[in-house]
Amino acid sequence: MIEQMIMAHSILVKIFLVFLLGGLFIPFVTKKNPAGFKKASFIYTMSFQALATMIAFTGLVIMAMNDFHWTLSVIVMIIVWALLMYIEIKKYKLIKVANIKDETTHKLLRGAFLKISLVQIMLVVMIVVLKIMEAKGVISLS
Ligand code: HEM
């Protein structure tokens, strides 16, 4: 049972990574469509939160099965998860209130979207690499 939950958690993380990579296209395909950028950004943030919530849920179920055994690795995952959510909500609020019809604002926000996505991808890849190194016994975070 716990193996299945870890597998679900791990698959969700991979789906999340593919989703984040796909999101990189948003600023490009909406280059000439400010309203489309705002709409895509809304759908993106909602999907982001849905996936992140599923990751946290499966992670918490694994933890419950492990009798809430805290490891450095789990703490790092929770911190990064909270950071990812925080950045995403901040970004979304910025896009929501912006006067997107203004060309300079639209350009600025598309740039910000891209840079923020790259930071989020880097954070996810960092955890995946950390977990692989942990599994191979290169590092110990227990
Ligand atoms: C609230 C958030 C989270 C909780 C409570 C959580 C909890 C856990 C637990 C308990 C495990 C299994 C035990 C272990 O290997 O240490 C695990 C494994 C893992 N977690 Fe998380 N996690 C969370 C978020 C994340 C996030 C945001 C990522 C990546 C971006 C992530 C990536 C992984 C990976 C790659 C594994 C290893 C899976 C495997 O062995 O195949 N976790 N997590």
Image (cartoon, grey):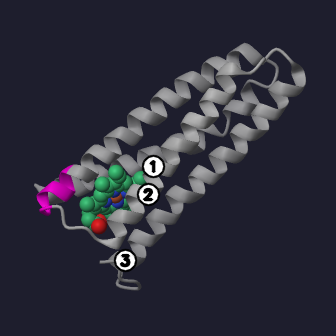
Which residue lies at the image location 49% right of the left edge and 42% below the top edge? Answer: 85
Q: Between residue 97 and residue 113, name the one nearer to us.
A: 97
**Which mark lies nearer to you, 3 or 1?**
1
- What is the span of residues highlighted in magenta in the rendered image? 61-67
- The type of residue carrying mark 2 is Ile
Q: Which mark is residue 82?
A: 1
- The type of residue carrying mark 1 is Ala
- The type of residue carrying mark 3 is Glu
| Whether residue 125 is visible | yes
Which residue lies at the image location 83% right of the left edge and 26% below the top edge? Answer: 105
Q: Which residue is mark 3?
A: 134
Q: Quadrant of ligand 1?
A: bottom left
**Crowding near the residue tagged with mark 3, few <14, some 14–19, many ≥20 C-alpha atoms within 10 Å:** some
Which residue lies at the image location 42% right of the left edge and 77% below the top edge? Answer: 133
- Evaluate if marks 1 and 2 touch, with contact meaning CB atoms under 8 Å apart: yes
Q: Is residue 62 magenta?
A: yes
Question: Is residue 63 shown left or right of residue 111?
Answer: left
Above or below for 47 versus 62: above
N-terminal of the pair, mark 3 or mark 1, is 1
Above or below for 136 versus 111: below
Real-space CA distance between mark 3 and mark 2, rounded to the nearest whole angstrom: 18 Å
Q: Which residue is mark 2?
A: 79
**Crowding near the residue tagged with mark 1, few <14, some 14–19, many ≥20 C-alpha atoms within 10 Å:** some
Q: Secondary structure at mark 1?
A: helix
N-terminal of the pair, mark 3 or mark 2, is 2
Indicate the position of residue 20 as horizontal and vertical percent values: 55, 43
For the N terminus, the quadrant is: bottom left
Question: Is residue 58 shown left or right of residue 118?
Answer: left
Real-space CA distance between mark 3 and mark 1, rounded to the nearest whole angstrom: 22 Å
**Crowding near the residue tagged with mark 2, few <14, some 14–19, many ≥20 C-alpha atoms within 10 Å:** few
Image quarter for residue 77? bottom left
